[in-house]
Structure formats: C-alpha cells, structure tokens
Image (cartoon, rainbow, N blue to C red):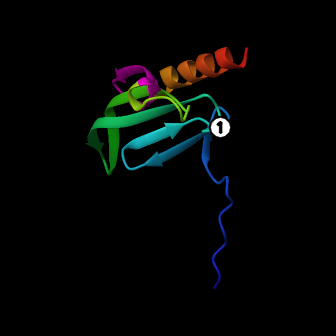
Amino acid sequence: MAQKKKAKDDFLYYKGKPFVRCDNTIYYGNMSDPHVIVMQVLDSKKVGDLDVATKVSVQLVSTDENAKPKDKILKRIEKPGIFSAMDIADIWLERANSAKAN
C-alpha cells in the first residue's frame, strides 16, 4: 500500500505561524521573516505518561544570514512552562517582525 506523500508545508501552526519541534527545541515563525523564535525545554516532569515542560528558554533570533552568530540572539528569557513561553514568544515575534516591516 502506497503511503500518502506529505505536503511541503505540513507544519503545525500557532496564531498563523509555523510551529516545529525537534527533540527539546521548538522553532516558531517563518524563516523568510526577519526574526524567528527558538525555544528549548530545559527541564520537564512526568505527569502520567506525558513529559510536561517546567522550564523553557525563549530566544528571539534574527534570520539575517550575514549577522555574526553571537549577534543573532536579540532577546532571551526563561519561563516556567510552555504556555507562558508561547505567550512571550508570540509578543516578541509580532513586535520584531512588524517593526522591520515599517
């Protein structure tokens, strides 16, 4: 039986922006935009069968290929869970990308 081929843009979306997870790292935003968010789950605890994030690092990162690696990270904060991390991530991303558009 042939498997159905995945679409190129087969991502999860949060508030209209791609949300991609690779192990304990989450990328949020379009790579074609001036900025994206990189979140890393630093600590988690077991709740039933699930691992729940208890400490998340949030970074606002420039997608400028010409920027030095140390200059790419524009803001950084640690939050006590994924929901508070997503709240600040969305605010930072909206403000950073709309400021560049103006």
Residue highlighted by disc 1: 32
Given residues 27 and 64, the one toward you in this image is: 64
Q: Position of residue 58 (x, y in %)?
A: 41, 27
Given residues 7 and 43, the one toward you in this image is: 7
Q: Is residue 87 above or below residue 7?
A: above
Judged from the image, the secondary structure of the residue bearing numbered disc 1 is: loop
In this rendering, position of residue 53 left or right of residue 86: left
Residue at 61% x, 49% y: name it: 11
In this rendering, position of residue 90 left or right of residue 5: left
Q: Position of residue 63 (x, y in %)?
A: 55, 33
Q: Is residue 54 above or below residue 94?
A: below
Q: Tell me the amino acid under the disc marked 1.
A: Ser
Q: Quadrant of the N terminus?
A: bottom right
**Magenta region includes residue 73:** yes
In this rendering, position of residue 86 left or right of residue 6: left
**Magenta region includes residue 2:** no
Residue at 71% x, 19% y: name it: 101
Q: Quadrant of the C terminus?
A: top right
Residue at 38% x, 50% y: name it: 23
Q: Quadrant of residue 76?
A: top left
Question: How many discs appear?
Answer: 1
Q: Position of residue 46 (x, y in %)?
A: 27, 44
* Part of the protein shown in magenta: 71-84
Q: Position of residue 54 (x, y in %)?
A: 31, 31
Residue at 33% x, 24% y: name it: 80
